[in-house]
Image (cartoon, rainbow, N blue to C red):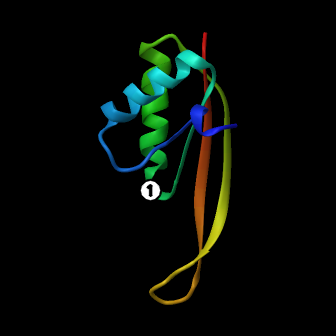
Amino acid sequence: MTEDNVCFIGSKEYGTYTKAIMTKVEKGPIYVKTRGKHIYNAVSICEFLSRTKDLKIESVKISSSTFKSDKDNKERIIPEIEILLKKK
């Protein structure tokens, strides 16, 4: 997995990520990654692309990471998701 085949989902508009994914998937499979509150966006974007474009969700990996909060110095568990998209 290189930077060329990874798209990180954040708080931008869906169209921005859709365009980026469609551009990158021309070169081969692409990993869509995100964590925390943006997981819903990543799943929605990948589902939209699999229904409307010639893409297939190949695999989904769910994990979590532990981070220390700067505010109260507590450890937080943050969920992560990685979705592999390929052309059909």
Identify the image quadrant of residue 27. top right
Q: Which residue sits at x=51%, y=10%?
A: 54
Q: Residue furthest bottom?
A: 72
Q: Which residue sits at x=49%, y=84%?
A: 70
In this rendered view, identify the residue nearer to me: 66 or 8: 8
In this rendered view, identify the residue nearer to me: 20 or 82: 20
In this rendered view, identify the residue nearer to me: 69 or 48: 69
In this rendered view, identify the residue nearer to me: 77 or 1: 1
Please tell me whether residue 52 is drawn above or below residue 48 in the rendered image. Answer: above
- Residue 73 visible within the image: yes
Q: Position of residue 60 (x, y in %)?
A: 66, 36
Q: Position of residue 44 (x, y in %)?
A: 43, 35
Q: Helix, strand, or loop for circle 1?
A: helix
Q: Which residue sits at x=49%, y=90%?
A: 72
Position of the C terminus by quadrant: top right
**As drawn, is 81 to the left or to the right of 13?**
right
Q: Position of residue 36 (x, y in %)?
A: 50, 58
Please tell me whether residue 27 is drawn above or below residue 79 in the rendered image. Answer: above
**As drawn, is 15 to the left or to the right of 26?**
left
Q: Position of residue 67 (x, y in %)?
A: 60, 73
- Residue 31 visible within the image: no
The residue wearing badge 1 is 37
**As drawn, is 63 to the left or to the right of 72?**
right
Position of the N terminus by quadrant: top right
Q: Which residue sits at x=45%, y=22%?
A: 23
Identify the image quadrant of residue 57. top right
Identify the image quadrant of residue 77. bottom right
